[in-house]
Amino acid sequence: MKTIEFASEEVNNTSPWDQPRGDKNNDNNSYEDLVLKPEYAKRRLRFDAGQTWFRIVPAVAGSTHGWMMRLHVLNFARGHFSHPRTLKPNAKSVFDHAYAWALENAPAGLYSKNNKEGVRLLADPMRLFWALIEREGKYVARLVYLSGYDGSRGGAPGLGWKIWNLCYERDEIGARIADVVSPEKGVLVSVEKNQPKGSKYPSYHLTLGRNPKPMSELLTQMDPEEIDALCPLEHTVRELSDEEQWQCLAKIMAPSTAAQIRESLGHPNVNS
């Protein structure tokens, strides 16, 4: 069993919206969730109806991110994957090349407010963090992967964004209500999910616990394999090859069009 060390609070408090210094288990088996590496995908936490309490894990020492990591996620028919710039700043995706080609050659086919049936090639903001949750008297390590949309373009902000704001909420005199991600002073967080019958989308109510839940205490209530799973967040993200990205692109447009875009680049390695 490895020893877990956590990064300083300066790292923990780094916003996932700043440039990083380095870089219900799905019931539908046909959906390709390619964001996380296979060995970590099974650890994804999905919120069931009702209340779920969990402890946010501080940034693991050695991570180039804080306790919450920002991701850029690209969607294709019945699946999604992480844009290469999630792990490599300024990296290009096959979808970026396809978007540039479409702007020049077939702009009418792109998604827009006026053309919601068009092909959408831009990435969505997502957020990722480790959490500990109690299962049968022991704590287990889970990855929480949620929308990081801030609501600036209309609509409700994503749950990942709301959790970030909750952790840094201040009272009427400007003091932090709780040091949520401190290794020893941190408290539990509650997400209560409600979806009335007939409602298309669920609503969420967030609450902070009142009593500290030291990580040192919770680690003693974990099996060795659960502790061993904890690692820097960037180690959990899957990086698709160019060839795999081309296969994803071909699922949202005519394969002949995808082939035409690929041919226009003049070389097989689009990230070079």
Image (tube, rainbow, N blue to C red):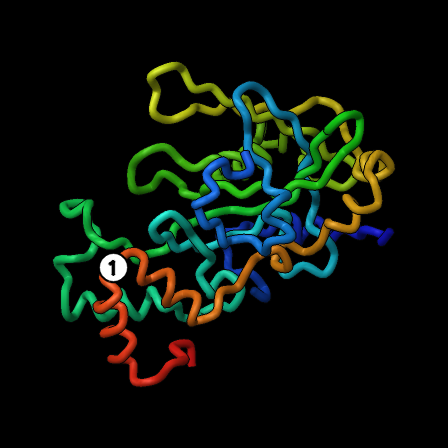
Q: Is residue 172 visible?
A: no
Q: Residue at image x 59%, y 42%? A: 44
Q: Nearer the viewer, residue 241 or 7?
A: 241
Percent x, y of residue 235: 64, 59
Residue 116 occupies which quadrant of the picture? top left
Q: Residue at image x 38%, y 47%? A: 78
Q: Is residue 11 visible?
A: yes
Percent x, y of residue 220: 87, 37
Judge the density around disc 1: few (<14), some (14-19), many (≥20) Cα neighbours within 10 Å. some
Vertically, is 192 above or below 223? above
Q: Nearer the viewer, residue 152 or 137?
A: 137
Vertically, is 20 above or below 113? below
Percent x, y of residue 9: 70, 49
Q: Residue at image x 15%, y 62%? A: 107
Kindly give the residue lying farthest to the top in the view shown. 197
Is 44 on the left-hand or right-hand side of 203?
Answer: right
Kindly give the residue lying farthest to the front in the view shown. 29
Quadrant where the C terminus sits is: bottom left
Three-letter amino acid code of the residue under disc 1? Met
Q: Disc 1 designates what residue?
A: 253
Secondary element at image label 1: loop
Percent x, y of residue 121: 30, 58
Is 145 on the left-hand or right-hand side of 188?
Answer: left
Residue 179 occupies which quadrant of the picture? top right
Q: Residue at image x 33%, y 64%? A: 95
